[in-house]
Image (cartoon, helix red, strand yellow):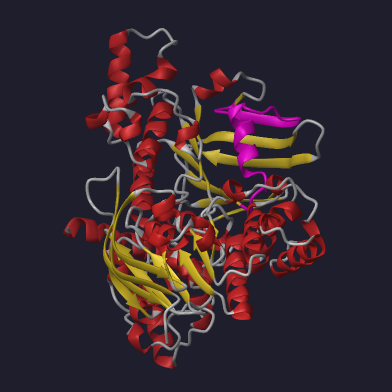
Amino acid sequence: MKPIISFKDFSFQYNAQKRPTLHNINLDIYEGEKILICGASGSGKSTIGNCINGLIPFSMNGNIEGECIVDGINTKNSSIFELSTRVGTVLQDPDGQFVGLTVGEDIAFALENDCVKQDEMYNKTLEAARKVFIDSHMKHAPYDLSGGQKQRVSMAGVLVDDVKILLFDEPLANLDPATGKSAIELIDKIQKETNTTVIIIEHRIEDVLWEKVDRIVLIDEGRIIADSKPEELLCSNLLKQYGIREPLYISSLKYAGIDINKVENIDNIKTLKLNKEDINKINTWFLKQDKLVKHNDNDVILEVKNVDFAYENSLKVLKDISFKIKKGEMLSIVGKNGAGKSTMSKVICGFEKALNGQIIFNGKDITNDSIRSISAHIGYVMQNPNQMISQALIFDEVAMGIKNIGLSDEEIEKRVYDTLKICGLYEFRNWPISALSFGQKKRVTIASILVMGPEIIILDEPTAGQDFYHYTEIMEFLKELNNLGKTIILITHDMHLMLEYTNRSLVFEDGKLLADKSGSAVLCDEELIKKASLKETSLFNIATMANILDPVEFVDCFIAYDIKEKDNGKQSS
């Protein structure tokens, strides 16, 4: 059988790079296959995708050796236009793909370029929209849609052209858990119904494996480390070795001493089967674990009382919100896009003013205080560091917030240097920010807030778009700040982050506070998960299969054990 995509001794080096990004790639992908390409940030996985869709070499210049053949065409002798009729690409940020003023116009764009007759164009556009269940929004502006809806519009826009290959570059990056789950289900449905070849580039293995894939290609430093069936890769230790988080249910089975090579359907939590011996091992392991006792006896540092909020001329975005946060807590705020999470944080910081209710900090009502006054106590770190950074040099960026509060140059320098040391950035103090990685820029923005001396730091999606290595790096850093006494509030879609790093979760839905309890309790509550558009943890599935009466306690025990194992691994290394 002839492959529809074939890399033959393929290497690629960007003109701006000193070394090749891809080294001697040999990879065949066959018609109708669903392939997952994974790897840490900078591994070269997105570069492979850009070679398939023609962005390399026609938009991104560099030196090519070997061949990349797509549907019989050697890409370096082709064009982006010719390849676009064969490969449809859905980017992680759909906003970057929109060209139409309405959903219908955007989907029809490729057909307009091909001068398709109007009646035929209408029918094809509607058919593509129906395939992805966005046909009821044809007259809406794409930018007014939710993250999941935007992604569906992008998918319809490439399906309308009857492409043979669908390429998804980190499709889960900006989606809430339930929408991400729906996206994976939709991709699977389209692939099965159309027999389209599907390539998913993503480092969130467990989320992609919600539906089965044919093969997983693991990339590291521009080389193919593994090209195998999912069950073979999951039963190896290659994922952890190359900086990819293995599925939680796999780790739980390993901790219980189960030989995962013998577990039926190990590659999919929905079809996985445990035998009686496996179930006994899980229960034996669980009974041996110390039960977690979590207490925080500190005073309340922040109280939100009966807060309502609405943007100008709109319905209420926040409805009678009340909760308390104790000093030194590290808690998460979760819920689907548009639930009110970020709006709540903006009201707390004074960026927006509540219609009703109070924000009380250390017993003092700060509801009507100025942003400047509040920022001395509560800092806010945006999701994208590039939206916060305004200075060219690291020192200047961190010092900017304290330059006009009456400190001498010597005091400013000391405070900035001390903060940079805490953030692991002191050696870069005189560097230009442009020379830093995304994760390092994130630290700079945290440092620029930390230097102000706030007691509370709110971070919006601190790990968005980060691979497991950089996720761990930033979260361990935040844990160190928390250990220094800082109260940390995390707005996140990452359910593992919620479980591993926070003791409490505030669950928002449609501007209301649905729940205030531990992350494990949230993710073992099927009704709450459905209401808040979250996604159950696979640990809950394992606990249910093993007939464990208290799944919440099982999840807590796993997280505690997992943290201990990681700490032991650090010490041994």
Residue 457 appears in the rendering: yes
The percent coordinates of residue 545 (x first, y second) are 51, 82
- Between 551 and 125, the one nearer to me in the picture: 125
In the rendered image, the vertical position of residue 416 relative to residue 96, given as above or below: above
The percent coordinates of residue 84 (x first, y second) are 54, 61
The percent coordinates of residue 138 (x first, y second) are 78, 56
Q: Horizontal placement of 329 versus 221: left or right?
A: right
Q: Give the range drawn in magenta.
A: 335-363
In the rendered image, the vertical position of residue 502 relative to residue 127, given as above or below: above
- Between 19 and 451, the one nearer to me in the picture: 19
- Between 266 and 569, the one nearer to me in the picture: 266
Q: Horizontal placement of 232 versus 120: left or right?
A: left
Q: How many marks?
A: 0
Q: Quadrant of the C terminus?
A: bottom left
Q: Residue furthest left?
A: 572
The percent coordinates of residue 273 (x first, y second) are 48, 87
User: In the figure, residue 522 lies in which quadrant?
Assistant: bottom right
Q: Quadrant of the N terminus?
A: bottom left
In the rendered image, the vertical position of residue 358 relative to residue 74, given as above or below: above
Q: Which residue lies furthest to the bottom in this view?
A: 276
Q: Horizontal placement of 317 versus 28: left or right?
A: right
In the image, is residue 233 part of the stretch drawn in magenta?
no
User: In the figure, residue 225 lies in which quadrant?
Assistant: bottom left
Q: Kindly identify the residue that appears in the image at 73 percent across and 45 percent down.
A: 101
In the image, is residue 356 part of the stretch drawn in magenta?
yes
Residue 247 appears in the rendering: no
